[in-house]
Image (cartoon, rainbow, N blue to C red):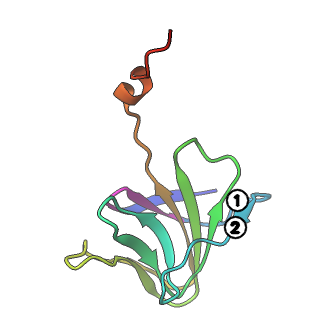
Amino acid sequence: MKRTIIAAQGEVRIYKIDALPTGMQTRKPELTKSGAAIISHSEQGHHHCVAGADVMERTDNVPAGMQVFYAIVKNATKLEQDAAVPHKSIPLEADSIYEMRVAREFDPFAEQARRVAD
């Protein structure tokens, strides 16, 4: 599968791909009240969303703490943030397939800190 990064928005990396992976397991994404697929939640409570595309979340072979979404775009749309002052939207071309990866972060202090046990 050919994968080309086209943009990033916050913790979301967007790749244009030539085909969906075969045999993957998926589920429907969470939706906003208006029906847009939620790709990522920000710590401020805003969402990165895609409307007007067939979006699925991959549930197998995804690294711990990461999310992977696929969007089949028939008519041009965009990835947008629903904040009062949003990031610039990212256009998604018609007749295209996109992979969107939500980054993960490792916190070494959380791994080291623990309750004292006796």
Q: Quadrant of residue 71?
A: bottom right
Residue 30 covered by magenta stretch: no
The residue under label 1 is: 21
Residue 106, image x, y percentages: 41, 35
Please tell me whether mark 2 sits on a helix, a strand or a loop.
Answer: strand
What's the mark number on residue 108?
Answer: none
Neighbourhood count class around disc 2 (C-alpha, 10 Å): few under 14, some 14–19, many 20 upward: few
* Mark 2 vs mark 1, CA separation in Å: 14 Å
Look at 44% across and 64% down and name the residue there: 40
User: Residue farthest to the right?
Assistant: 23
User: Residue farthest to the top?
Assistant: 118
Q: Give the range drawn in magenta.
A: 9-16
Residue 93 higher or lower than 66, as above or below: below
The residue under label 2 is: 27
Look at 49% across and 14% down and name the residue there: 117
In this rendering, position of residue 51 left or right of residue 87: right
Residue 35, image x, y percentages: 53, 87
Residue 74 higher or lower than 3, as above or below: below
Position of the N terminus by quadrant: bottom right
Which-is-in-front pick, marks 2 and 1?
2
In this rendering, position of residue 46 left or right of residue 99: left
Q: Which of marks 2 and 1 is nearer the N terminus?
A: 1
Please tell me whether mark 1 sits on a helix, a strand or a loop.
Answer: loop
Neighbourhood count class around disc 1 (C-alpha, 10 Å): few under 14, some 14–19, many 20 upward: few
Residue 13 covered by magenta stretch: yes
- Magenta segment's dominant SS is strand
Residue type indicated by callout 2: Arg
Residue 69, image x, y percentages: 57, 64
Residue 5, image x, y percentages: 43, 58
